[in-house]
Image (cartoon, helix red, strand yellow):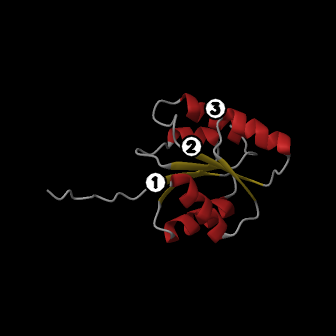
């Protein structure tokens, strides 16, 4: 018996207070075949959680709810608890990276980024 494999597009939530960064990330991901949902801060992201959700890409420094707050909220959310989270930020301090990892971040990319760098990290994290 041959099983039919159904391929589903993977949905990525990208969170950044900069519309320009959101557009660049969305363009790179859509070009690589992903569906993208955009949010402007952590609170906005929690209100837009797509289902199913494959990955979250978030900035750290945002108004209303920052990236660390979002990561902690996602790790406490039953539908997002195990979803990989990539931090995309201008921060490069080891202490910030450690804080994000302790909160539950999976990977880290420093801005500015190249689209191919972003998609390579996404593909690696998603397996």
- Give the labeled residue for mark 3: 72
Question: At x 46% / y 54%, what residue is drawn?
Answer: 11
Left of 35 or right of it: where is 71? right
Q: Earlier in the sequence, mark 1 or mark 3?
A: 1
- Give the labeled residue for mark 1: 11
Question: At x 73% / y 42%, what residue is drawn?
Answer: 63
Q: Position of residue 6 (x, y in %)?
A: 28, 58
Q: Quadrant of residue 110?
A: bottom right
Name the secondary structure under disc 2. helix
Question: At x 57% / y 35%, what residue is drawn?
Answer: 74
Q: Is residue 33 visible?
A: yes
Question: Circle 2: is it few (<14), some (14-19), or many (20+) Cα within 10 Å?
Answer: many
**Disc 2 or disc 1, which is closer to the eye?**
1
Q: Position of residue 82 (x, y in %)?
A: 51, 37
**Disc 2 or disc 3, which is closer to the eye?**
3
Instruction: Give the CA distance from mark 2 to mark 1.
Output: 13 Å
Name the secondary structure under disc 3. helix
């Amino acid at each position: 018996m041959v099983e039919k494999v159904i391929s589903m597009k993977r949905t990525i939530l990208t969170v950044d207070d900069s519309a320009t960064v959101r557009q660049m990330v969305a363009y790179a991901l859509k070009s690589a075949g992903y569906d993208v949902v955009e949010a402007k801060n952590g609170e906005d992201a929690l209100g837009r959680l797509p289902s199913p959700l494959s990955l979250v890409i978030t900035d750290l420094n945002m108004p209303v709810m920052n990236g660390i707050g979002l990561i902690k909220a996602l790790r406490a959310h039953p539908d997002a608890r195990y979803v990989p989270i990539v931090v995309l930020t201008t921060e490069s301090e080891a202490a910030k990276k450690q804080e994000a990892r302790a909160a539950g971040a999976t990977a880290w990319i420093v801005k500015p980024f190249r689209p191919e760098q972003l998609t390579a990290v996404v593909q690696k994290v998603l397996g």
